[in-house]
């Protein structure tokens, strides 16, 4: 069987899409390795981990470039070193005076550069008080070149020989391109296949969408150049496939959606959310689960609770992220009458029964970027998989599923920026008679079982690799996926379901792992999910896309 090596610029501990794809390809018979980053960005050790039939190799981030770049951008930070060397050499006597011959002109040059940079930096901070953590555009692009690029080169050099290299997102693609360039396939004139797994329109997502036009054009040019060298592009929905196809005209485009495996809810709906949040029996429960970050519609959901006809509705927010503290503070507002609740994230294999406890899944993602507008949230598919109808933003891909599916409607759509529109959509679902509600939940579950499930999606991925490499069993991948998911869910359902939920680890953004097809639009968190120190842009975490996820 063939060997496939994937590259992803995160630690690959909670990246649901990357892990799910690797496990499925391994079950299809391929030997799979993931090249990732260490859990600790400061680590200098190569880490290895085995899970689900594949190996994760974590390659340290390059750091040598940072010292010189920081001194060039922020020369005043070198004052302690300059002062120490000057006094040290003076005290050493004649031996030290020789060193002063080259140190003094260096010091003069450093003082001149400091005199130039200091006022310009002070002016910039005064005129850009909203400056995002991680620095200005030059900082970001420099990190792109030396941190992402440096890691890609190191990961490619450490990667095993393979028949195919798979780059996740634009930050993982350079590793795959570099590895394919370094190695022939089996002989002269051949090369490994290269697959680009674009979880989003990278240059239209998160912080990238806020870069100046010239900086984004640099990234677009680089992406176009790399796409010209790939054999296939994989992405998460039809709208992204069409957009990326227009932008770059790849040889082949395959859609593999971020759907969970098929799941059959138990007889009698679970009631975990009401018990965990202390919600009275019979009160309608709407659920937002996933990343607590900006532009996801959490504030609008809360405002919708104040609309007429919503007096009995309780909103539960199940997840983790940088906006958690703000969300907790807001739900304490007495205007909501104790009808808004924040619960900690749960592990992915425990998620389905929690989602099934809701009467409605709500996801009014805001149109802050093109990426959000074209997104298909993980939470959308996870709700349908649990037989829960949804209220989603009236955006193309979500409308296509909620209102245009063969079993539609599977809920309702709304104007995500208008709390009254959200409230009307919620009421249109919750106020149905009991028999219509039961039929609606049955349609959602049927749609998930027949169309929106990983067993269906993985067949496209394995078929792609079978075409590229000439081997791989679709049937084995699907059958093994069904068996593995059933075993994992059974294990996750053991024990007392009334116990408190397990908090997600630091940096995890979603109840069930990664949250979006998109990069999170959250300036308070570095793109790799690690908090950054305010006011210290040079030391912020290196740019990296967040895990694939929900959009």
Image: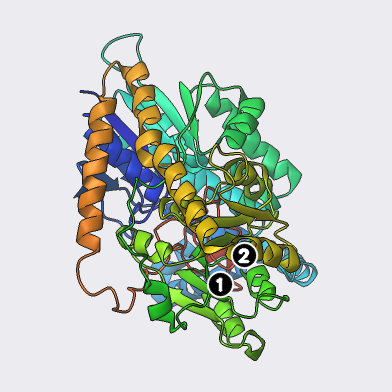
**Looking at the image, do the residues carrying marks 1 and 2 touch, with CB atoms under 8 Å apart?**
yes
Q: Position of residue 197 (x, y in %)?
A: 46, 35
Report the residue that reaches farthest toward the top: 189
Instruction: Tell me if residue 78 comes above or below residue 342 in the rendering.
Output: above
The one of 479 and 295 positioned closer to us in this rendering: 479
Q: Quadrant of residue 247?
A: top right
Q: Of 501 and 107, which appears nearest the observer?
A: 501
| Label number found at residue 294 | 2
Mark 2 lies on a secondary structure that is loop
Q: Is residue 542 above or below residue 148?
A: below
> Farthest residue in the bottom direction?
334
Q: Is residue 97 visible?
A: yes
Q: Secondary structure at mark 1?
A: loop
Q: Residue at x 29, y 30 (%)?
A: 4
Q: CA distance from mark 1 to mark 2?
A: 7 Å
State the image coordinates of residue 99 (x, y, percent, origin top left).
46, 62
Around disc 1, counting alpha carbons within 10 Å, would you say few (fewer than 14), some (14 to 19), or many (20 or more)? some
Ranked by sequence position, the earlier of labels 1 and 2 is 2
**x and y percentages locating residue 521 in the rendered image:** 61, 58
| Total residue callouts | 2
The location of residue 541, given as percent across then percent down, is 49, 61
Q: Residue at x 27, y 11 (%)?
A: 187
Image quadrant where residue 75 sits: bottom right
User: Which residue is identified by label 1?
Assistant: 323
Which corner quadrant holds the N terminus?
Answer: top left
- Tell me: 295 left or right of 518: right
Mark 2, Cα crowd under 10 Å, few <14 / some 14-19 / many 20+, is: many
């Amino acid at each position: 069987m063939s060997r496939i090596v994937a590259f992803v610029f995160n630690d690959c501990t909670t990246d649901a899409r990357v892990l799910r794809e690797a496990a499925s390809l391994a079950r299809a018979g391929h030997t799979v390795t993931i090249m990732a980053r260490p859990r600790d960005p400061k680590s200098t050790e190569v880490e290895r981990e085995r899970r689900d039939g594949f190996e994760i190799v974590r390659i340290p981030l390059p750091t040598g470039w940072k010292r010189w770049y920081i001194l060039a951008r922020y020369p005043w930070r070198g004052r302690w070193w300059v002062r120490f060397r000057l006094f040290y050499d003076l005290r050493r006597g004649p031996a030290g005076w020789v060193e002063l011959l080259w140190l003094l002109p260096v010091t003069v040059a450093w003082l001149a550069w400091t005199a130039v940079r200091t006022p310009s930096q002070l002016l910039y901070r005064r005129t850009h008080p909203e400056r995002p953590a991680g620095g200005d555009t030059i900082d970001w692009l420099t990190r792109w070149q030396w941190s992402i690029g440096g890691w890609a080169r190191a990961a490619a050099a450490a990667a095993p020989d393979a028949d195919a290299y798979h780059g996740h997102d634009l930050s993982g693609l350079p590793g795959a391109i570099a590895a394919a360039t370094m190695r022939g396939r089996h002989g002269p004139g051949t090369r490994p296949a290269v697959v680009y797994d674009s979880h989003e329109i990278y240059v239209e997502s998160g912080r990238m969408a806020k870069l100046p036009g010239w900086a984004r054009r640099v990234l677009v040019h680089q992406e176009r150049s790399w796409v010209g060298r790939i054999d296939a592009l994989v992405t998460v929905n039809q709208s992204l496939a069409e957009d990326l196809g227009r932008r770059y005209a790849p040889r082949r485009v395959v859609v593999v959606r971020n759907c969970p495996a098929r799941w059959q809810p138990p007889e009698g709906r679970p009631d975990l959310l009401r018990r965990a949040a202390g919600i009275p029996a019979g009160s309608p429960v709407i659920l937002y689960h996933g990343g607590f970050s900006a532009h996801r519609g959490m504030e609008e959901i809360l405002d919708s609770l104040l609309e007429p006809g919503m007096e009995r509705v309780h909103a539960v927010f199940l997840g983790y992220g940088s906006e958690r503290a703000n969300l907790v503070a807001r739900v304490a507002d007495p205007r909501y009458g104790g009808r808004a609740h924040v619960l900690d994230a749960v592990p992915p294999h425990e998620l389905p029964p929690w989602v099934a406890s809701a009467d409605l899944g709500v996801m009014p993602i805001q149109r802050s970027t093109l990426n959000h507008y074209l997104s298909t949230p993980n939470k959308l598919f996870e709700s349908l998989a649990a037989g829960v109808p949804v209220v989603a933003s009236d955006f193309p891909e979500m409308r296509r599923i909620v209102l245009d599916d063969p079993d539609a409607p599977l809920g309702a759509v709304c104007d995500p920026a208008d709390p009254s529109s959200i409230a009307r959509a919620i009421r249109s679902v919750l106020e149905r008679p009991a028999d219509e509600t039961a039929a609606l939940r049955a349609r959602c579950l049927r749609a998930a079982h027949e169309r929106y499930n990983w067993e269906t999606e993985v067949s496209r991925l394995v078929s792609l690799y079978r075409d590229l490499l000439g081997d791989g069993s679709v049937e084995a991948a699907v059958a093994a996926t069904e068996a593995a998911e059933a075993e994992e869910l059974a294990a996750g359902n053991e024990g007392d379901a009334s116990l408190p939920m397990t908090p997600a680890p630091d940096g995890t953004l979603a109840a069930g792992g990664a949250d979006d097809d998109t990069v999170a639009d959250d300036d308070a968190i570095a793109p790799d999910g690690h908090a950054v120190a305010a006011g210290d842009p040079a030391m912020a975490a290196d740019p990296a896309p967040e895990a694939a996820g929900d959009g």
